[in-house]
Image (cartoon, grey):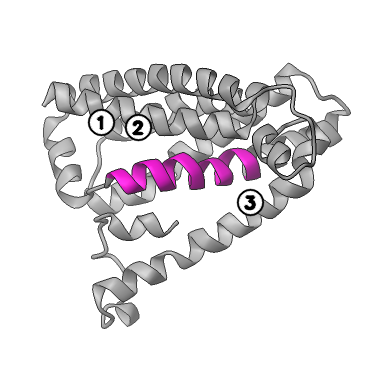
Amino acid sequence: MLTLLTATLPYEDIPEQFAQFPPNIIKLMVLINPTIMLMIAVLIGTLLYDKVKLTVPTIASLLKMDHPQITLVQQLKYGVSLGLTAGALMTLTVFVFEAIIPQEFEALKNQIEVTLLVRFGYGGITEELLLRFGFMTLVVWILSKLTKLLNSPIYWIGIVISTLLFAIGHFPIVYASLTHPSLVMLTYVLIGNSVGGLFFGWLYWKKGLEAACIAHIFAHVAMVLGELLLN
């Protein structure tokens, strides 16, 4: 979570009563809501993940809680390969949309600077705890209670809903950075932030939470390499 302190975000739209504080204090204040959400997500995930047959095999093994059916090496294999694939698709999405709306992408870059620490730390770990371990687990559990089923469609609905929530969650920062973002930009934000979520959700379901975290990190590795090659 603290890796967010290294990012440059649009703070111009903060409420007037907070404008008097120094930028570093404002950054710390911005961490309050995500920290509370993370604590709630971890609590929900911890209470419910095993009830819907989702797993955290490596952590469970380290804590002597379970004998996992998948090893960390296997998680690495799936996480790295699917993470790089997701990252390549995300890079392609950026390339296509940036060619269509270059001015908006340039304006967005001028307002937001995301460091490698944010990408790997917040993106790879915090977002997976929030979106997969917390929210996806909760959605799957609720659906299983409502339908009395725990089958592939239930998991896929959980994957899609958590993925869309993550993508739509980027809209406020886009509106804070661009006065009137175009429909094309909003479409990019929706698609670009959904591609990876489908991979990460499937990995959480099939290979465990650690595999999803690994994949998220390596998706960013692929995107960083793609940016270096394309720029």
Q: Which residue is mark 3?
A: 41
Question: SS class of the residue under badge 3?
Answer: helix
Residue at screen point 88% across, 28% down: 148
For the magenta stretch, what is the residue range? 116-134
Q: Nearer the viewer, residue 75 or 88?
A: 75
Q: Are marks 1 and 2 in contact (CB under 8 Å)?
A: yes
Q: Quadrant of residue 27?
A: bottom left
Mark 3–mark 1 distance (CA, rounded to whole Å): 28 Å
Q: Which residue is mark 2?
A: 220
Q: Which residue is mark 1?
A: 224
Query: What kind of residue is marked 3?
Result: Ala
Q: Are marks 3 and 2 in contact (CB under 8 Å)?
A: no
* Residue count near mark 2 (Cα–Cα under 10 Å), binned few <14, some 14–19, many ≥20: many
Query: What kind of residue is marked 1?
Result: Val
Quarter of the figure with the C terminus: top left
Q: Is residue 229 left or right of residue 168?
A: left
* Residue count near mark 1 (Cα–Cα under 10 Å), binned few <14, some 14–19, many ≥20: some
Query: What kind of residue is marked 2?
Result: His
Q: Nearer the viewer, mark 3 or mark 2?
A: 2
Mark 3–mark 2 distance (CA, rounded to whole Å): 23 Å
Percent position of residue 68, x then y = 74, 28
Quarter of the figure with the N terminus: bottom left
Mark 1–mark 2 distance (CA, rounded to whole Å): 6 Å
Q: Quadrant of residue 6?
A: bottom left
Question: SS class of the residue under badge 2?
Answer: helix
Mark toward the start of the polypeptide (3 vs 2): 3
Looking at the image, is 200 positioned above or below residue 22? Answer: above
Mark toward the start of the polypeptide (3 vs 1): 3
Identify the mark at residue 30; answer none if there is no mark.
Answer: none
Q: Is residue 78 left or right of residue 88?
A: right
